[in-house]
Amino acid sequence: MLKGISPLISPELLATLSTMGHGDEIILADAHFPGDSFSHNVIRADGLQIQDLLDGILPLFELDAYVPEPLVMMAAVEGDTLDPQVEATYRAPIDKHAPNAPAIARVDRFAFYDRAEAAFAVVMTGSTMKYGNILLKKGVTPVAE
């Protein structure tokens, strides 16, 4: 365990976050997401909830300030509905650690799958919230002065 780093962040996830460059994307996926079908870099975080991982990751991870949508979730499939509580649950740690982050963008299912294929990594969680997947785009880490 390391001081100042959430114990929910596994060594594999910490190394992945550190290795990512600006513009790279990581998916925090719900338990139903077909991560292994889309990514060669799948990290297991079974039993953990996405909002808890966001709370552990965002103090370490700068969101990309040079794009309008550094946070992306899947839009509902036609005829389906979103539970607004899912996004609200994610906004709490986002607003805590990145208060200037823009609204979470929504893209259709297949566009999200395309982003997952190109993502640096997919983290498979134990979350069962419907439409619970979220993409984070890494920005430039500020240099301490």
Image: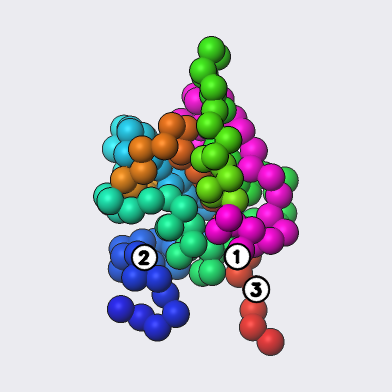
Residue 30: percent from left, percent from top: 38, 40
Residue that mark 2 sits on: 9
Q: Quadrant of residue 143?
A: bottom right
Which residue of the protein is positioned furthest toward the front in this rendering? 85
Q: Is residue 106 magenta?
A: yes
Label 2: few (<14), some (14–19) or many (≥20) C-alpha neighbours in 10 Å: some
Residue 109 in sight:
yes
Query: Which callout, 1 or 3, points to the residue nearer the camera?
Result: 1
Query: Which callout, 2 or 3, points to the residue nearer the camera?
Result: 2
Among the two numbered marks 2 and 3 on one chain, the one whose residue lies closer to the N terminus: 2
Residue 80: percent from left, percent from top: 51, 18
Q: Residue at x 51, y 69 (%)?
A: 60
Q: Looking at the rendering, in which quadrant would you find the C terminus?
A: bottom right
For label 3, the SS is loop
The residue closer to the viewer here, 46 or 36, is: 46
Residue that mark 1 sits on: 97
For label 2, the SS is loop
Q: Is residue 24 left or right of residue 64?
A: left
The residue closer to the viewer here, 101 or 93, is: 93
The residue closer to the viewer here, 3 or 108, is: 3
Measured in 3D between alpha carbons, the distance from the residue under mark 1 to the one under mark 3, in whole angstroms, is 14 Å
Q: Is residue 91 magenta?
A: no
- What amino acid is at disc 3? Pro
Q: Quadrant of residue 104?
A: top right
**Stretch in magenta:** 92-116
Measured in 3D between alpha carbons, the distance from the residue under mark 2 to the one under mark 3, in whole angstroms, is 21 Å
Residue that mark 3 sits on: 142
